[in-house]
Amino acid sequence: MRISVREKTVNYVILSLFALFAIIPLLGVLLSSVTPSAQNSGGFSIPTAIDLGNFGTAWTRGHFGTFMFSSVLVTVSVVVLTTVLAVFAGFAFGRLDFPGSNVLFFVMLAGLMLPAEAFIIPLYFNLRSVGLTDTYSGLILPQTAQSLAFGIFWMRSQFRSFPGEVIEAARLDGARDVRLLWQVMVPAAIAPIMTMSLLITMWTWNEFLLPLVLITSEDHRTAPLGLAFFKGANLTDYSLLSAAGVIVALPIVVLYFFLQKRFISGMLGGFADR
């Protein structure tokens, strides 16, 4: 079916409007971050001079070196743990038959339906009783559990769509479950796994409620939590606030920029791209 010139024009106009709604606020923050503090009134304006020193001042004054280290440590740990566990569990639920698998799978899916606000208070008291509040483990373990429901759901659907004839051929060659998973199915699922990992990376990096409740010392604050405290101390310095926001968002933007092809192919293609 061919699309008419009129339909194409309408589509491009609508998409352009949505793109402007997304780009203009980001452009405003970026311009504000390089505007000298004395010239910044908080509105959208093009600076007459560029002051890159805002980033250095925000980094030093806000202790973002410590906060970024905490966020990187927590995010990498959560992504690695979730990915490994989700691959194993997704394979088990998608390709192995064991008693109660369907019931157990739907019980695990409850993690997708429970908001963090529903269990944050009992979680805090449980972690405090075992001495895990204000620790990296207290951030890594709950966020891994939070992301695992989605990871299992995602990998189960990917492994269930894997070509059955390839699995049968591997079985005939003597491949057992672990070899079948890591040498046959995982290499073919790199794009979906990277898509899942990127989504979990964004969710974990941007997590605010858990660090806010579980972390009390500055040494263990993550970047979004540190940004909130920095905002409270610099309410009227819009240039520093914008620079701090760019610093916190930049790692995820760069990561997505370099992995966008993998992300899109994993969302749309799965195993079909191999």
Image (spheres, rainbow, N blue to C red):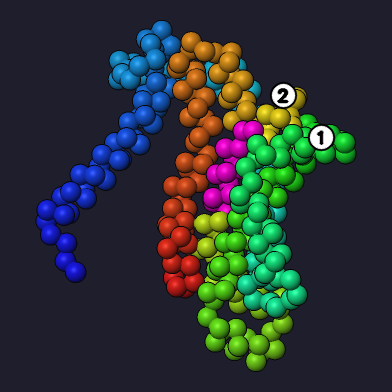
Expressed as whole percent of the image width and height from the top left, the position of residue 248 reads 54, 32
Callout 2 environment at 10 Å: few (<14), some (14 to 19), or many (20+)?
A: some
- Whether residue 7 is visible, yes or no, is yes
On the image, numbered disc 2 is attached to which residue?
Answer: 218
Q: Earlier in the sequence, mark 1 or mark 2?
A: 1
**Vertical position of residue 145 compared to residue 219: above or below:** below
Q: Nearer the viewer, mark 1 or mark 2?
A: 1
On the image, numbered disc 1 is attached to which residue?
Answer: 125
Expressed as whole percent of the image width and height from the top left, the position of residue 154 reads 57, 61
**Vertical position of residue 134 compared to residue 109: above or below:** above
State the predominant SS element of the stretch in magenta.
helix
- Residue at 59 percent across and 30 percent down: it is 224
Q: Does 90 lie within the magenta span?
A: no
| Residue type, mark 2 in image | Glu
Q: Callout 2: helix, strand or loop?
A: helix
Q: Does 202 lie within the magenta span?
A: yes
Q: How many numbered marks, from 0 up?
A: 2
The span picked out in magenta is: 197-209
Expressed as whole percent of the image width and height from the top left, the position of residue 53 reads 47, 19
Q: In the visual, does 52 lie left or right of 72?
A: left
Say which of 115 and 159 sits in front: 115
Callout 1 environment at 10 Å: few (<14), some (14 to 19), or many (20+)?
A: some
